[in-house]
Amino acid sequence: MTMQERFYNNNDMLTSPPVPCDYAVGARVMFTNDSGMVFGPYRVIGFAQVPSYGRFLHIDWESPWFAVRPESLSPVV
């Protein structure tokens, strides 16, 4: 079983954000890292129970266990 499969099977993600934000589970988004590089599209798969350094959104990327900040995302239209 891969690390991603273990995360999906054993997660404690919420289906509603712990703080108000513009994204919901299933939303299609692009991710911009701290260097300004844009990746995606991805989907929001859930929310962390407790934000850490403003990060609480989980997306279906290579590291789904690493939550991202809402400011790092932009909607796909």
Image: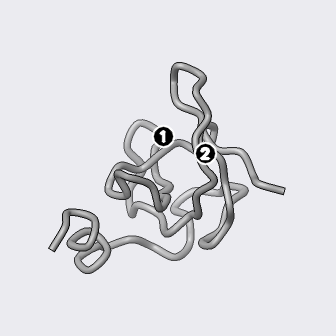
Say which amino acid is labelled 1.
Gly
The structure residue drawn at horizontal position 48% and vertical position 40%, both measured from the top left corner, is 54
Say which amino acid is labelled 2.
Pro
Give coordinates of residue 64: x percent, y percent.
37, 57
Q: In this view, does 23 lie to the left or right of 17?
A: right
Which residue matches tag 2? 70
Q: Which of marks 2 and 1 is nearer the N terminus?
A: 1
Give coordinates of residue 41: x percent, y percent.
63, 54
Determine the secondary structure under disc 1.
loop
- Is the C terminus in the top left, top right, bottom left or bottom right quadrant? bottom right
Report the disc number at residue 36. none
How crowded pointer 2 is (Cα within 10 Å; few <14, some 14-19, many 20+) is rated as some
Q: Nearer the viewer, residue 24 or 62?
A: 62
Q: Is residue 59 left or right of residue 77?
A: left
The structure residue drawn at horizontal position 60% and vertical position 49%, both measured from the top left corner, is 40
Q: In which quarter of the image is residue 29?
A: bottom right
